[in-house]
Every structure is written in C-alpha cells, then in structure tokens.
Amino acid sequence: MALIVQKYGGTSVGSVERIQNVARRVAKWKNAGHDVVVVVSAMSGETNRLIDLARSIQPIPDRRELDVVASTGEQVTIGLLSMALMSLGVPAKSYNGSQVRLLTDSAHTKARILEIDSKNIQTDLRSGKVVVVAGFQGVDADGNITTLGRGGSDTSGVAIAAALGADECQIFTDVDGVYTTDPRLVPEARRLSTITFEEMLEMASLGSKVLQIRSVEFAGKYRVKLRVLSSLTDPDIALNEEENSGTLITFEEDKMMETALVSGIAFNRDEAKVTVLGVPDTPGVAFKILKPISDANIEVDVIVQNVSTDGKTDFSFTVHRNDFERTLESLKIVAKDIGARDVTGDDKICKVGLVGVGMRSHVGVASKMFEALSKEGVNIQMISTSEIKITAVIDEKYMELAVRALHQEFDLATSN
Ligand code: ADP
Ligand code: ASP
Ligand code: MG
C-alpha cells in the first residue's frame, strides 16, 4: 500500500464527464489499496474567465481581491470531484487551501508556500477517505486568500506530497508526459521516458508549462518522486501499466544521457526586455537598477551588460510581460537617480532555449545553435548560458520557426 498524490490540471477536469473519469481513475487506485490525495485545478478556461471578470471592473485589479476571485475556480472542482467519488461509493472530502492550512507568504498572485499542516488530511486518510484539495491557493498568516501564480496547482500537488511524505506525486495532464519540446508546436516531438530533475528545472524556467517551476524546485528539495502522465487515457487502464507510463523525473543521470547532447527545447512568449541606456560604469549600478525591481517582487531573468565606452554602458534584462509596464516605470526613476541617459523596452520578444545534461561534456553546442538560427535569418538579441542550458532572446515573430529549426538541427525526433 502506498500514499499517492495525484494532481489533475484544467483540461483533465474540464467537463462533468472528465471529472467523472477522474473519479473513476482515483477510485481504481483507492480500491487497489492505496491512500490517495487528489489536488485539482479549476476547470479549463475558468481561471482566465475569472481574471477577465476582475479586469472588466478594475483594469489593474487589486491583488488581494484578484486572489479572492481567481481562487474560486478550484473550489468548484473540489466539490464536484468529491461528489463524483461519492457517487462511485468512494468516501471523499474536499478541502480548500485555508481548510488544509496551506500557509503562504502575503505576495498576492504569486505567493510562496511556507508551511502545510497535514494533520486533518492524515486523519481523513486513516478513516478511509480520499482527500480532494484545491490547488493554486493558500492562506497567509492573517487569513487572506492567496494564489501561487499561474499553473500553481502543480506546486500545490508536489508540496502536499512532500508534506505528507507521499510515495509518489503523479501529475496528470492533457499530454502523456514530458516531450523534447511542446508537441503542440512540433508534432514530431518525442516523449521522454525519463528526464533529470536538473533538466526539468531548466525546461520549466524557460517556460515549458507542463510543470510550474516551483513544483520542480519543491520536488528537488524534498526529493519527491514525480511523474507526468496522461489523464486522457481510459480511466480503467491497468494499474501496473499506468504506474510506469508517462515521464519520470529522475535524480540520477542515466548512462544513455551522456550521448544525448540536448534533451529538450523550451520557449516562452510571455517575455519583455528592458534596457537602461548610457549607465555610468561604476560599482553599484547593477544593484541600484535591480534592487527596486526585486523589491517590487518582479523576477528578472537574462541580464546583459556591455563593455563600456567612455565610462558608459547599456544594461538590459528580461522580465515577465505582465511586469513590463511596472518595470519601465520603476527604471525611469532609477535612471534619473544614477544619471543614465534613457530607458527603452520591447515586449515583443521571446526566449528559446536548449537544455541537456549532455552539454556538460560537449563543446560546440552553442555555435551549432547559433548557426541553425542564422540559417533561418533569426537575429539573436541576448544570450545566456548555464552548464546545461543555452538561452537566446529573439523577436517573438520567429519563435515557432526557431523552435522547429533547432528541433531538427539537434535531431530530437529520433531517440539518440
Ligand atoms: P494542466 O492544465 O494539466 O496543468 P498545462 O496546460 O499547464 O496542463 O500543461 C500541459 C501543456 O504543456 C501541454 O498541453 C503542452 O502543450 C505544454 N507543454 C509545453 N512544453 C511541453 C513539453 N516539453 N512536453 C509536454 N508538454 C509541454
Ligand atoms: N487554475 C490555475 C491556472 O489556470 C492553476 C493551475 O491550473 O495550475 O493558472
Ligand atoms: Mg499547468
């Protein structure tokens, strides 16, 4: 008997029929003798609808109230799924974030989990119930409802698995695992049966939305066994077939991977670039530029600073597109302060990146990547690298072309 946490995303619970299928799948695991905690998202499209509603009243919604509105989608799903389980004769009980007491900080719309009280869940599991928890939401120390950022139910699932010491966290979604790149963009993309935790972290950080990055961080920190698999198969599929399906996130590099130069390609369109022009090249300016940005809880990614000519340099970095306007405003104040010439920005850019532990032991991956992009006439605006990742910032209109060209160039459709 094992303790399993299963997370089902929006498409997987997108209709009454799909919720009933989830209930059948959960019942199958429960009836096989396992303890099951289910974490669910809002029905597909629901969170977008709720956020649009908020924006129709307040174009830049108050963040606390936005969380009150956006978190309601998940509450509908937990009730419906619990009822669907009961209809199958499986005792079930739903919990929203504050009922669990999934404690977060107070950073509304992108709160971080601080602590999870697992007492109530454990009592219910002992009494034979399936526990159904609302993903994406928590509560801060003052009792305010918080949400964990878009895609945050993945993080709820993994964090609850970690708090309960679960044997496995299964992320059920609308694809049957992690692919070499988004199969919706590149139909030849290949499913990976395993991917290392490090690679998954880089893929997620580049914007591959199959797992929210914080869920991967949690899995790494608490060594949660994590698997991504399909919710769209027949719910009555044999348990032993299902438990080995999908993609397992591993902690060990397997030997085969030494030969695979690149494991995957990720991309993200929700990016924007800002540049402070003519910055005096003196100690402390990078700090002065970035401090107010991090104080405003804005995440900064690729950072580039040029060599200075005449003691002046240009300083560029990328932020999420939603944070573009706020970043520009904040930089205009800083620019005056530090005596920079001007601030410019571009919110029509995207990030495309190669990920692979094989890069550690190979040279020439970057030049092969840049050659493939140049053959397609794609101009690279910024570059950043880590040991196992190379990211290029390019004009968003070339994103699909670039991803397809790189997938082909590195021969990812064929297993190597
Ligand atoms: P859920 O609602 O289940 O959380 P998401 O839409 O958040 O599902 O994530 C699943 C989607 O992630 C897939 O439908 C796919 O389009 C996208 N995706 C992006 N990159 C990858 C990848 N490398 N492998 C698999 N899916 C990917
Ligand atoms: N419902 C939330 C969203 O759409 C959380 C999630 O699906 O993971 O972002
Ligand atoms: Mg998701």
Image (tube, rainbow, N blue to C red):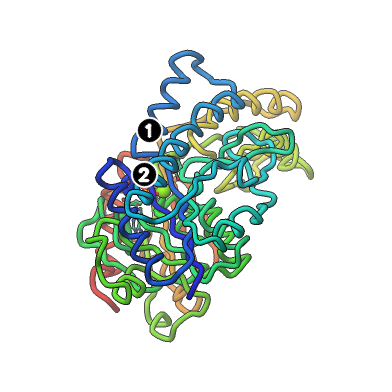
> Dot 2: few (<14), some (14–19), or many (≥20) neighbours within 10 Å?
many
* Residue 171 percent across, percent down from the top left: 41, 59
Whichever of callouts 1 and 2 sits on the residue coming sooner in the sequence is: 2
User: Image quadrant of residue 25?
Assistant: bottom left
* Residue 402 percent across, percent down from the top left: 30, 52
Judged from the image, the secondary structure of the residue bearing numbered disc 2 is loop
Residue type at mark 2 is Gly
Determine the residue positioned at 59% across, 26% down.
63
Question: Under 8 Å from ligand 1: the CB of mark 2?
Answer: yes
Determine the residue positioned at 43% across, 44% down.
41
Quadrant, the C terminus: bottom left
Determine the residue positioned at 34% across, 73% down.
193
- Left or right: where does residue 77 sit relative to residue 180? right
Give residue 194's mark: none
Q: Is residue 397 above or below residue 405?
A: above
* Residue labelled with disc 1: 46
Are dots 1 and 2 in contact, CB under 8 Å? yes
- Left or right: where does residue 49 sit relative to residue 250? left
Question: Under 8 Å from ligand 2: the CB of mark 1?
Answer: yes
* Residue labelled with disc 2: 10
> Dot 1: few (<14), some (14–19), or many (≥20) neighbours within 10 Å?
some
User: Image quadrant of residue 347?
Assistant: top left
Residue type at mark 1 is Glu
* Residue 85 percent across, percent down from the top left: 37, 51
* In-front residue for pair 283/106: 106
* In-front residue for pair 140/336: 140
Determine the residue positioned at 69% across, 33% down.
143
Judged from the image, the secondary structure of the residue bearing numbered disc 1 is helix
- Left or right: where does residue 187 sit relative to residue 106? left
* Residue 172 percent across, percent down from the top left: 37, 57
